[in-house]
Image (spheres, helix red, strand yellow):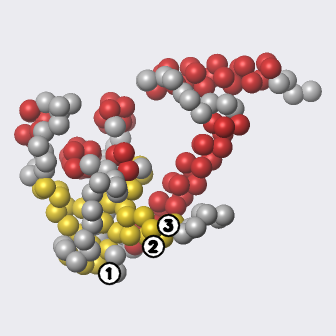
């Protein structure tokens, strides 16, 4: 989350950020909403959803208000004060059925609250596509022996990947 906050300036108005549960917090969503960036994230396991609450859009699909929690240590008082006391988000549950694995239900959170304009099925498909990208990246990391990247900044991670790529090509030249 800290690296993403450092990259906020690269996000444009009306962009859509697809992310995993690490980015599903009131503060991340509120900060992105201030920048008019939309979000579709996997809900964090600590947050519980009751689909009987809020404005119902359909089965396992509703719009609810999230209330601002106490200020986290990483956030300064001015930023905290600039955030609204509540944000309006949409929570929806979809089924993810990766080939070879059992079906899993996942709750997604999004700032795209218009159920007619953004149908539940379309948001579910978009999240599934993000999951496939995640699997492809994992496959590349395993193939190139990059499971444990040690860089703590985007520049250092890029250098580490390039160094590994050079090593793989020198150690295993194509004949």
User: Which disc, if any, is residue 121?
Assistant: 2
* Label 1 packing within 10 angstroms: few (<14), some (14-19), many (20+): few
SS for callout 1? strand
* Label 3 packing within 10 angstroms: few (<14), some (14-19), many (20+): few
What x and y, as percent, mark residue 7? 36, 33
Residue, disc 1: 58
Foreground: disc 3 or disc 1: 3
Question: Which residue appears farthest toward the right when viewing the image?
Answer: 175
Pointers 3 and 2 in contact (CB under 8 A)?
no
> Sequence order check: which comes first, mark 3 or mark 1?
1
Relative height, residue 18 to residue 167 (above, below): below
- Give the Cα separation between the discs numbered 3 and 1: 20 Å
- Give the Cα separation between the discs numbered 3 and 2: 16 Å
Q: On the picture, is 25 further left or further right than 158? A: left
Pointers 3 and 1 in contact (CB under 8 A)?
no
Please identify the quarter of the rendering in which residue 41 is found: bottom left
Residue, disc 3: 104
Q: Residue visible at 32% across and 60% down?
A: 109
What x and y, as percent, mark residue 111? 28, 59
Pointers 2 and 1 in contact (CB under 8 A)?
no
SS for callout 3? strand
What x and y, as percent, mark residue 153? 43, 24
- Give the Cα separation between the discs numbered 2 and 1: 11 Å
> Sequence order check: which comes first, mark 3 or mark 2?
3
């Amino acid at each position: 989350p800290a690296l993403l906050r450092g990259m906020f300036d690269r996000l444009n108005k009306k962009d859509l950020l697809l992310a995993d549960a690490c980015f599903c917090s009131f503060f991340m969503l509120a900060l992105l909403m201030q920048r008019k960036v939309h979000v579709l994230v996997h809900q964090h396991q600590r947050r519980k959803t009751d689909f009987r609450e809020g404005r119902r859009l359909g089965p396992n699909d509703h719009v609810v208000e999230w209330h601002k929690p106490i200020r986290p240590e990483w956030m300064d008082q001015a930023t905290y004060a600039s955030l609204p006391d509540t944000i309006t988000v949409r929570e929806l549950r979809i089924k993810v059925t990766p080939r070879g694995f059992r079906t899993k239900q996942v709750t997604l959170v999004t700032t795209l609250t218009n159920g007619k304009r953004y149908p539940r099925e379309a948001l579910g498909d978009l999240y599934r596509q993000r999951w496939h990208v995640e699997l492809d990246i994992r496959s590349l990391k395993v193939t190139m022996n990059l499971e444990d990247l040690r860089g703590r900044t985007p520049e250092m991670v890029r250098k580490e990947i390039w160094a590994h790529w050079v090593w793989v090509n020198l150690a295993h030249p194509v004949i």
